[in-house]
């Protein structure tokens, strides 16, 4: 439960609300462009780049990689934060383990239906709590919030938790994704207020 001042502490003793953020009980809908119309029968998740072999998963085989549940706070670059989000989906680690990623891969470009991309260091994606979510607070994601699948990287600003994920490209160097080319920070740490470059 949030305090009126937003000064609630995390289990590690640090303040829970990053600087410049305010709490919301709702979940604002923000994205560029229209919501993609997707069909689970034709949906595919592709992985390419610095992997031993390019792979493609249909909905059933992707979810068969493993399931997990996690609870995390989310922090949007537009200054709202939402506590205690319950996620269910495929852990990033399970996807990574299935791909045969080459050692020179250090960064990932996340590709989404609708043409959106965002860049994330591979080391960040391998942290605890990072998953490809299909459900939020016990219900399937709505299309506006990324159905059928969105990435969740809770320790970065929420634009890095891309909606409508369709694949990962493994890279040896960082390069900007969609919002990053328009001036958003390459990394996006909410605790350092890395909003814009």
Image (cartoon, rainbow, N blue to C red):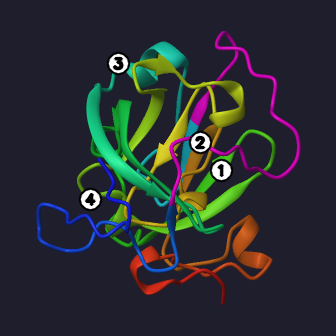
The image's mark for residue 111 is: 1
Judging by the rendered image, the residue that carries numbered circle 2 is 27
Of tags 2 and 3, which is closer to the observer? 2
Disc on the earlier residue, 3 or 4: 3
Tell me the magenta residue range: 23-45
In the displayed orientation, state which residue is furthest to the left.
12
Q: Residue at x 37, y 68 (%)?
A: 5
**Mark 4 Cα shell of 10 Å, populated few (<14), some (14-19), many (≥20):** some
Instruction: Give the percent coordinates (x, y) of residue 20.
Output: 52, 78
Per the image, label 1 sits on a secondary structure element best described as strand
Question: 43 or 36, which is in the foreground?
Answer: 36
Q: Residue 64 appears in which quarter of the rendering?
A: top left
**Mark 3 Cα shell of 10 Å, populated few (<14), some (14-19), many (≥20):** few
Disc on the earlier residue, 2 or 3: 2
Per the image, label 3 sits on a secondary structure element best described as loop
User: Pointers 4 and 2 in contact (CB under 8 A)?
Assistant: no
Question: Which image quadrant: the C terminus?
Answer: bottom right
Disc on the earlier residue, 1 or 3: 3
In the displayed orientation, state which residue is furthest to the right.
33
Of tags 1 and 4, which is closer to the observer? 4
Judging by the rendered image, the residue that carries numbered circle 3 is 64
């Amino acid at each position: 439960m949030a305090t009126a001042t937003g000064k609630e502490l995390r289990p590690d003793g640090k303040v829970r609300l990053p600087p410049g953020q305010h709490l919301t009980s709702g979940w604002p809908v923000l994205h560029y462009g229209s919501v993609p119309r997707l069909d689970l029968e034709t949906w595919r998740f592709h992985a390419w780049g610095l992997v031993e072999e390019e792979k493609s998963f249909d909905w059933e085989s992707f979810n068969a990689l493993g399931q997990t549940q996690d609870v995390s706070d989310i922090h949007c670059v537009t200054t709202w934060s939402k506590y205690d989000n319950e996620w269910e989906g495929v852990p990033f680690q399970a996807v990574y383990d299935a791909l045969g990623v080459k050692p020179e891969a250090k960064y990932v470009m996340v590709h989404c239906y609708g043409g959106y991309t965002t860049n994330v260091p591979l080391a960040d994606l391998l942290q605890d709590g990072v998953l490809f979510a299909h459900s939020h607070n016990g219900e399937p994601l709505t299309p506006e919030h990324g159905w059928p699948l969105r990435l969740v990287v809770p320790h970065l600003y929420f634009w890095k938790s891309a909606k409508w994920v369709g694949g990962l490209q493994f890279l040896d160097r960082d390069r900007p994704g969609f919002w990053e080319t328009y001036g958003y920070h390459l990394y996006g740490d909410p605790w350092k207020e890395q909003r814009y470059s």
